[in-house]
Amino acid sequence: MSGQTRREFLHNGMSFVAMGIGMPALFMEAAQANTLGKLASLGSSPSSTDKILVLVEFGGGNDGLNTVVPYLDPVYQKLRPKIGVRKQEVIPIDKNLGLHPRMKPLMELYEKGHLAVVNGVGYPNPNYSHFESMDIWQLADPAHQMKERVGWVARYFNEDGHLKTNPLSGLTLSGNMPLAFTAEEMAASVYSQGQEDPFTSSNKGDTEAQAKLAARRAIYSQGTVANSHLDFIRKVGQHAYTNTTEIRTALATYDKKASKESRYPQYNDFANSMQSVAKLIIGGLSTRVYYVSVGGFDTHANQPYAHGQLLGTIAETLVAFFHDMESQGRMNDVTLMTFSEFGRRAEENDSNGTDHGTASMMFVAGGAVKGGVHGEHPSLTDLKDGDLKFTTDFRRVYANVLDSWLGADSQKVLGGKYDALKLI
């Protein structure tokens, strides 16, 4: 960029936006990541009938052993005499494994063949840091072989020309832009619950508010010198207006179509976020990948109650979400995948909890999913320094989702060839 650095331009552009005539917060990070000349294709949205992926992060390190329980293994009860799930309470899914009792609602999906349980998920040379291990999952790069810190979903977007620079290709409801979506030219946006729409106002009697709205529209519609910095701001504003309208329309459509069976847990952020995702999908938003996070899985102490509450809310929410999808004929268009940065140690600690461990589990759900149990459950008698040995490299799950669901070349996106699990 002539005359000033990109960083200086972005700083000045943000100052311009802060003057009360700005772009929607939802598109700010996408705008920061784009450069001049990259906006021409922003209006080229993927079709609303394209396959959709919903990523759900279990933040903190989910205890896979108490989520998918080896309830017939006597070693399990020896390792966890206080916090282990009792055999008579487990919800069996095969002859050896069962779900935590609070996840009973998920059996509706499981019995229909729409829920896959993936065992022993991890990666070589595990890292016990929340931040570093989560980065590994987000980058899909355990050995740090890639030169640039570009997220695995962002690399998928970059492989698809019509997704690469569209701010609605990816949408996160987690409050921050996840590393999985992050790239130099970002094709993703942040959506906040109930955020202000900067192009409309419900208070028509507020003359000051109406004046600001008129000024915004005027600035974004006026002519500017082609390829100038102001032209960049104007184009971002124009596309922001279009995409904000698309989101608003999608949200309004939901109430007319929502399933009466979709009972989301009340007063819960995760449930609210998932219902928002349902609204946007049912409303026809063009987003290809959604990202939602739920925290609280770092259960070092008093684990049984807290973990049970989390799993119960998640199960109820996911069932409500898929009721929405099924009622609107979108069940076969949506695949949902959960993940966590690591599991917990096999043995309980002295605080009725578990410490940072290694291998855990994943759920993959949707109408196109081949349900059932996938992958070998880790041995409880063959541990490494008290930790489970992973049996399924998480990139095998990513490879299946990329190849069979998103229609991408997983070898290009993941930087290597992985024997994809047959989940889809």
Image (cartoon, rainbow, N blue to C red):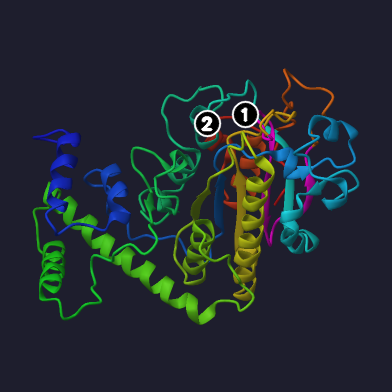
The amino acid type found where label 1 is placed reads His
**Residue 370 in view of the camera:** no
Tell which circle, 2 or 1, labels the residue nearer the N-terminal end.
2
> Residue 370, how many percent across, how many down?
75, 54
SS at badge 2:
helix
Task: Please say if the residues under marks 2 and 1 sit with CB atoms less than 8 Å apart.
Answer: yes
Q: State how far apart marks 2 and 1 are (Cα).
A: 9 Å
SS at badge 1:
loop
Question: Which quadrant of the structure image shows residue 96?
Answer: top right
Tag on residue 130? 2
Specify whether 124 is left or right of 77.
Answer: left
Q: Which residue is mark 1?
A: 356
> Residue 90, how many percent across, how many down?
82, 50
Specify whether 37 is left or right of 402.
Answer: left
Specify whether 292 is left or right of 112.
Answer: left
Question: Which quadrant of the structure image shows residue 263?
Answer: bottom right
The amino acid type found where label 2 is placed reads His
> Residue 83, how many percent across, how many down?
75, 39
- Tell me the residue at 55%/54% (across/down): 54
The region drawn magenta spans 352-375
